[in-house]
Image: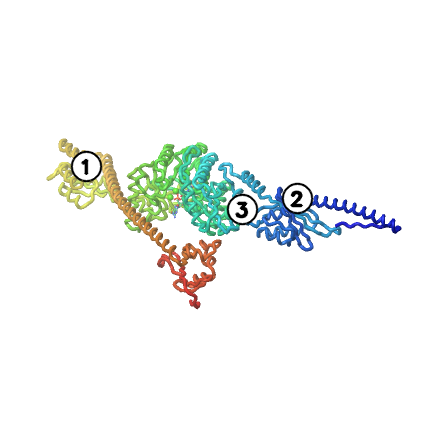
Amino acid sequence: MAYLAFRCKPAPVTTRARIASWIAARLRRGEARLAKALAQSRHEQQHQAALLAQVEEIALIGSTETLLATGETTLSAGLCRLFGEAPSADPVPAQWLWDRVPDEERQLVKFVRESVQTDEPFEFQHRIVRRDGGIRTVLHRGRIELGPDGTPLRLHATLQDITSRCEAERALDDLAHADRTTGLPNRHALLNRLGEATFAAQRDGRPLGLLVIGVDQFGLTHESLGHAASDQLLRGVTQRLLHVAPGAGTFAYIGGGEFALLMELADAGEAAAQGMARTLIDGVAGPIQAGGTEIFVTAAIGVALWPADAGGPDELVDNACASARQARQLGTHRVCFYTPEANARAALRLANEAGLRHAIDRDELYLCYQPQVDLATGRMIGLEALLRWQDGTRGNISPAEFIPLAESTGLIIPIGEWVLRTACRDIVRWQAEGLQPLRITMNLSMMQLQLPDIVERIQAVLEETGVDPQRLGIEVTESMLIEQVDHVAKTLSRLKALGIEISLDDFGTGYSNLGYLNKLPIDVLKIDRSFVHDVTAPTQDVSITRALINMAHGLGMKVMAEGVENEGQLALLVASHCNQIQGYFFSRPVRADAIAQMLREDKRLPEHLLVRQSRQRTLLVVDDEDNIIASLRRLLRRDGYHIITANSGAQGLQRLAEHEVDVILSDQRMPGMTGVEFLRRAKELYPHTVRMTLSGYTELQSITDAINEGAVYKFLTKPWDDERLREHVNEAFRHKEMADENRQLGARLQSANDELATVNQRLQRLMERQREQIRRDEQRLLSAHELLEGIPTPVIGFDVEGVVAYLNADAHELFPLSDSPLGRNAAEALSPELAHVWRSGDGVHVRVQLGERHYQAVCRPIGDHPHRRGKLMVLTPHGPGPWVH
Ligand code: C2E
Ligand code: CA
Ligand code: CA
C-alpha cells in the first residue's frame, strides 16, 4: 500500500471550491495513474511469479525463505513439486525440510544450514525423500540476508533436483571404471553400486547378497602363459557368467581372477544365494582356449550377505572375498558363506600370500639340502633340495604351510624356478671346489609339471648355469601322475631323455595304484617313511615294505627309503635290499655350507651297518684218498670256507643231508660209486648245489654226459694248480650266490605280488564300506533334515563348538532377518531367554516366553560320547505357567 501526503496554503471559498475541484480532479487523475501503475506492477509480479514457477519447473528447482528469528519458512511451488507435495502458501517450520531428508543425511543438512552465518553463499548436495517415497538427489544452494546492522535476517535457499545428472555422471564414472578386459564394472564401480543398493535395500528391508567368484586357473595361467592368455581366460569366463545368469544382478570384475555378482535377495536370502552360486559354478566349469592351450576352468565362490555380514560396501566386498579365498582353499567347486572365523583365517592367508610374493625379492627364501645315501657303499650320492622361508616378522614358516599357498596362487612357478637356479648355482660352486659331484633332486609341483614348456624352462636354467643334466633329479608325487598319466608320462620321458633322474616321491601314501607305474619312466621309487619300520615292527608291516621293494626292483627301479631315523630301521632296509636312504639318521636337511663340509670329510655310513648277514660258504670235498682231502683242506681253508669231507659217494650223500652245502668238489674214481654217479644223485636231491669233479684221468664220455645233463658244473683235473683251483672254487660260490639271489628275488616278487593283491583287495573292500557308509549317512542326513524342517516347532542346531549351525523354518522366525544367528556363537547370538536354556545344560526343560508365545525348551546332545556332533535345542509350544527350572 502506498501513501501520498500534500501540504497547501489557505485560499478564498470560491477559489477554495475551485481549488478543491482541481485537487479532486488531480487526485482522481493521480489515483487513476496510481491504480494503473499498481495494476501494471501486479501484472508484472504475476508475470514474474509465473516466470519463476516456469523456471523452477524447467530447472527442477524449488526455493525457500526462512525467517531466522522464528524459523518460519515459506516454500515455492517448485519446492513443493520437488517434494511431491501440494503447493501451499502457508509458512511451515524449518523442521519441515529436515523431516524430508533421509536419516543418515539429516544431521549434515541441519548442520550446514545452521552453521551459515555470513552472507557468503553456500552450496552442497544431499538426498531427499519425496512424499511417494522416491529418493532424489538435490543441489542445495543458499545465502543469508543480513539486516542494516549486520544481523542475519533471512535464509534464502534453492534446491535443485540433480538426480538424473548424478545418474548420468555415475554412468560415465562406471564407464570410466569399467574393467578393460572384461567390459564389466570394476571394483570402484561395484562399490558405487553397492552404496546405492544398500541404501535402497535398507529402505525396502530386503537383504543383498554379494557373491565373489574365484577362477582357480587364473594364477597359473597368468604366471605361466602371460597377460594375453589370462585376459582370454577372463573374457571366456565373463561370457559364461553373463550367459548362465542373465539378469541375476550386477556382475563386476574386481581383479586377481575374481568376479563379483551383486544380487537383491528375497527373504530367504541364503538359499537363493546358494542356488545362484551353484548355478554359476556349474555354468563356468569347462574348457576355455587361452594362450594356445585348452584350460579347464573351475571356480569356487564366497558369499557375504548385507546387512548380516557387513556394515558398508567395502566391508561387504572384503568379507565376500575372504569367503571366496576360503572356498578355494577347501577345493574346487566349493561355496563358502562368510563367517568371522573364516575372515580371520583368510586374513592370515592373505598376509602369508603377500609375504610370499615378496619373499624372493627380499631374500627370505633359502634352500636346505638333505643327503641321500647309497646302501651299497655308504656314501652320499645325492641331495634333496628343500625350500625354507624365513619371514621378516614371523620367522621360519613350515613348507607344509607355504608350499600349498604357493601352489594355489601360482607363485610356485617363479619360486620353483628360483629353487632350480639356486640349486644349480650350488652344484657349480661345489664342482669348482673340487668336491665329489652329487645329484641334486628338486620337488616339482603339479602346477610346474603342467606347464606346457616345463622341459624347456628346466633346460634353459641348466644351460644358463652350465650344469650337466645328469646332476639333476626331479621328484614328483603319485597324485600328480594319476590325473593326466599320458601327458605327464610324455613330459617325464622328455626330462629323462635329457639325463635327468626321475623319482616318485611319497610312494604308498596316495592312491598306490600300481597300474600306472610301468607306464612311467621312473628311475627311483621313494617309499614314504610310514613304510620304514624298526626291527620290532609286526612282521606283516615289514613284509609289505619288502614287497614294495621287490616289486620296484622287478620293474627295474631303484628304491630309496625316506625318513630313516635309527639303526634298527636301517638294518631292516639293508636286509630288504633297499638301495638308498635319506633321513635324520644320516643327516637332517642342512645349509649348503654344511653339505660342503660333509663332502670334504667324506662322511659316510659305517661299513658294519651295510653288510648283509649271510651264511658261511660251505664246501663238501669227496675223495677216497685221505692225503688229497688233507691237502685240499689246507689249500682252501684260507678262503674262509666251511669245509666238510667224505671218503665215498655214499658218505657224501650222508653229509649233504646233514649240512646245507653250496659247492661240491668230488673225485671221479672212487670205490662203490663214481664221482659222476654221486653228483647225479646230488643234483636230484639238492638241485641248487654247484657240483664239480676233480679227476686224475678222463673218461670223456661219462663226464660229457654229466655236463650235458647239468649234473656237473665244471670238470677240473688232477694234479691241480693251486691258484687256479682256488679261483674255480671261488667262482663256483659266486655262481651259487647269484643263482640264490635270483631265486629269492623271484620268490619275493611272487609273494610281494600276492601280498599286494590282498592289500589292494582289502583297500577296495574298505573303500566300498566307506562309500556305503557315506551313502547311508547322506540319506540319514537328508531325512533328518526334512524331518526337522517339517516339525511345527522351532529347532536350533549347534555344532560341537557351540556355533549356531542350523535353524528349521519355525526357528528362523524367532530371529529378526537382519540378525541371523547362523555361524555365530550361542552365547552372543541367542536372546537372553534362549541363552538361559543353552546354559541350563542338556536334558533340562526350561520354560521360556518369546514375545507372546510360551515354550518349553530343552537342549539335547547329538551323537554319543565321545563322538559328539553338537546339540539341538527344541522349543515346544506351551501354555503360560510358572517359571520352573
Ligand atoms: P618331501 O618331499 O616328502 O620332503 C621330505 C620331508 O621329510 C622334508 O620335510 C624333510 O625335512 C622331512 N624329513 C627328512 N628326513 C626325515 C626324518 O628322518 N624324519 C622325519 N620325521 N622327517 C624327515 P620338509 O622340509 O618340511 O618339506 C615338506 C614338504 O614340502 C616336502 O615333502 C615337499 O613336498 C615340500 N617341499 C619342500 N621343498 C619344496 C620345493 O622346493 N618345491 C616343492 N614343490 N615342494 C617342496
Ligand atoms: Ca621330496
Ligand atoms: Ca617325500
Residue under pointer 1: 692
Q: Earlier in the sequence, mark 1 or mark 3?
A: 3
| Mark 3 Cα-neighbour bin, 10 Å: few <14, some 14–19, many ≥20 | few
Q: Residue at x 38, y 63 (%)?
A: 843
- Name the spot of residue 386 as percent of width and height, x first: 42, 42
Q: Residue at x 35, y 48 (%)?
A: 566
Residue under pointer 2: 50
Identify the amino acid type marked 2: Ala
Q: CA distance from mark 2 to mark 3?
A: 36 Å
| Mark 2 Cα-neighbour bin, 10 Å: few <14, some 14–19, many ≥20 | few
Ligand 1 near label 1 (Cβ, under 8 Å)?
A: no
Please tell me whether mark 3 sits on a helix, a strand or a loop: helix
- Name the spot of residue 610 as percent of width and height, x first: 32, 44
Please tell me whether mark 2 sits on a helix, a strand or a loop: helix
Q: Earlier in the sequence, mark 2 or mark 3?
A: 2
Residue under pointer 3: 196
Q: CA distance from mark 1 to mark 3?
A: 102 Å
| Mark 1 Cα-neighbour bin, 10 Å: few <14, some 14–19, many ≥20 | many
Q: Earlier in the sequence, mark 2 or mark 1?
A: 2
Instruction: Return the residue nearer the eye: 524 or 299.
Output: 299
